Image (cartoon, helix red, strand yellow):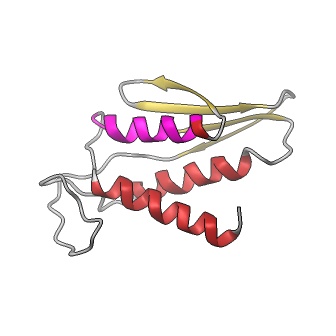
Amino acid sequence: MRDEELRNEVIGLRRKIHMYPELGFREYRTSQLVEDYLHDIGIKTWRIGKTGVVGEIDNGGHKRVALRADMDALPIQEENDVPYKSQIPGVMHACGHDAHTAMLLVAARVLSSVDFEGKLRFIF
């Protein structure tokens, strides 16, 4: 993908996540979005804890790299007037975790095509 396409992918994912914020250990919709996205780009996943997701690319070898992003939102009423504002009363991504999740998903897409001998893990 070109840089502009990747940028638009991050923005689209961030807005989708932003619209449906979930408090910690209640990120069921977000976890499903993460898992589906990773599956769609060919990355193996498994669940951890209550709502966590791990994706892994295993290209053999001994090197290991892990990247992590939080997914939870805060119990705050969103007052912004944007088309992608929170649809959940009293909950909003005021912390940037929506952006962190979107950026890590797109990083996983990019890294899935990099020649790396080892394991890459994406922890959400």
Q: Is residue 118 above or below residue 87?
A: above
- Above or below 35: residue 106: below
In the visual, does 109 lie left or right of 116?
left
Count of numbered circles on the image: 0
Q: What's the residue at 34%, 60% (across, down)? A: 95
Rendered residue at 48%/65% (across/down): 11
Q: Is residue 63 left or right of residue 121?
A: right
Residue most extreme to the bottom: 81
Examine the rendering and report whether any part of residue 21 can be seen: yes
| x, y percent for residue 7 | 58, 68
Quadrant location of residue 117? top right
Q: Residue 115: x and y, percent?
A: 86, 45
Q: Position of residue 32 (x, y in %)?
A: 41, 35
Q: Residue 30: within the magenta?
A: yes
Q: Is residue 124 visible?
A: no
Q: Nearer the viewer, residue 71 or 9?
A: 9
1 within the magenta span: no
Q: Which residue is painted at 66% across and 49% down in the image? A: 109
Q: Nearer the viewer, residue 69 or 28?
A: 28
> Which residue occupies the foreground of this view, 67 or 82?
82
Residue 41 against residue 18 in the figure, above or below: above
User: Where does the N terminus fall, quadrant-wise?
Assistant: bottom right
SS assignment for the magenta stretch, majority: helix
User: Could you say which is closer to the camera, residue 38 or residue 103?
Assistant: 38
Q: Which residues are magenta?
A: 26-39
Q: Is residue 58 left or right of residue 4?
A: right
Tell me where residue 6 appears, x and y as whole percent.
62, 64
